Image (cartoon, rainbow, N blue to C red):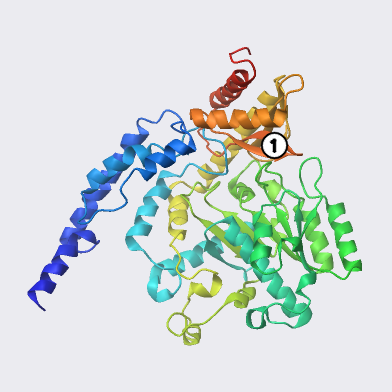
Amino acid sequence: MTTACKQTNTAFDHLFLHGEAGLTAFRKQMELVTEAVLDVYEEVDQPFIGKSHQQVRAEIQAMDTDSVNGRALEDVWNELKDPVLKNSLHVSHPQSMAHLHCPPLVAGIAAEVMIGAWNQSMDSWDQSPAATYVEEMLVKYWADLVRFPEEADGVFTSGGTQSNYMGMLLARDAYCLKRFGHDVQKKGLPENFRKLRVLCSEEAHFSVRKSLAQLGLGEDAVIPVAVNEHHRMDPAALKDTLDEMEQTGLHPFAVAATCGTTDFGSIDPLEEIADICQERGIWFHVDAAYGGGLLFSRAHKGKLAGLERADSVTLDFHKWLYQPISCGLFLLKDGGHMRLLSHHADYLNPKADEEDGILNLVNKSVQTTRRFDALKVLVTLKTVGTEVLGDMVDQTMATARFAADRLAGHPDFLVENAEPEMSAVVFQYKGSGDVDRGALNRQIQQDLFTSGKPIIAKTVVRGETYLKCTILNPRTTEADVKAVIEAVLDAADKRTTGGDSH
């Protein structure tokens, strides 16, 4: 080896997690990162700093994006502190309650460091020797919790959108193979693909439509089913829709039920939908990205009755399991269907590996390179424990009910879901006279966000803008709820009277 090569290799040592120089650098940089996080969080007294999107963008664009010879990490963190760290949403604040965006557990954050340090790639066993079997173990664990049979299988995903996509993909391909004897994976879509349909409620997650578009069937292949006054799918409407489709020669290959809608937290009647799907031989997918968090709940687990009858299930751990983004799971009742998306590459997952009993998880995923996200779930289950996880979910449910009751009892508000099924509360400030309620509530939400306290969301109900609190943080108290309501009233007063009249 030449002197130049020796010098070059030595010069890189402190940049990688190996050898004395690398380990020393890692220890120092972890200390700096920890201090940077603590430094910002010690100053955080509201969910957001309170700036417009133009201000934040300008501050980001003012930064340099690189350096020629590198800079000290301490200097870099100091530079990033104001434009990036302070301008970020502080999701751990108890008054951050806009979206299904959870505060991450400290255990999960710590596990993220381990995931990054080991950097396993979950596509083939020889790139993730232990991680492969940790994921296999966790898939079995969650399949058992859902009460799936022994032949169930699954894979970790980036979240609900990917899991729903996999459910629609496998449902389509299984139907085409069984009904038409057509292998979509090899031959593409069948001739009569324009007659393929999926049914879901009007409140289903947009990823169902997005999946059908990406699968080449188009958004029009999704047939919305009417919901009742509680925003749950109406089984009678589902039956009627299926009858009409049968008469017109359409091919419904899946029903996608929702266990916890994004806006209202509504849970479709899973048992009744399962009966309908079973009678007609239709794939039953359940999007439980939100509602799956009730699996550990002692007070509300019964709301999941019928989940075990699904053919496929979506779970999201970066919602009510409080994991750092991203972390999801796709479960399949009949693991044999995984063969419908399996491809073999000699350099990655050759067929000979299967004959030798080697598990290559790329055979179960639409991704190739994939993170070891199962580790943070394992660490959480071990360090926090299932009882505490259930208590946290039940606490947020109780807080949401308090919020709904408080809002419903106030003369200035309309509450769309006065008895929230989960932890989301949708409401509207009434205003007075002939005020445009939708426009006023949109302004209120925007004003609150740019003030930085508190952070709530907006949505549209029957064509009008409503406000929404999604409570995932078990540290959110009744006092926080009262403060949020007071902030909404203050913002409304400033918009309507220019003062504080309530």
Q: Quadrant of the N terminus?
A: bottom left
Per the image, the residue denoted by label 1 is 420
Up-down: is 305 above or below 245? above
Label 1: which secondary element? loop
Viewer can see residue 148: no
409 or 45, nearer to the observer: 45
Q: Quadrant of residue 4?
A: bottom left
Query: How far across and down, in percent of the image, does residue 283 sit?
Result: 74, 66
Instruction: Give neighbour class at mark 1: few <14, some 14-19, many 20+ (Cα, 10 Å).
Output: many
Q: Going by the image, does 459 lie left or right of 484?
A: right
Lateral position of residue 424 relative to residue 175, left or right: left
Measuring 70% from the left and 61% from the top, which residue is drawn there?
285
Q: Is residue 256 left or right of residue 371?
A: right
Residue 294 versus residue 191 in the image, above or below: above
Write the residue at 51% across / 61% down: 138
**Looking at the picture, how far across and down is residue 332, in whole percent?**
63, 66
Residue 154 appears in the rendering: yes
Amino acid type indicated by mark 1: Pro
Q: Nearer the viewer, residue 204 or 290?
A: 204
Where is residue 35 shown, x and y percent of the image? 28, 40
Horizontal and vertical percent position of residue 259? 68, 50
Quadrant where the C terminus is found in the figure = top right
Q: Which residue is rendered at x = 70% and y = 20% of the image?
A: 412
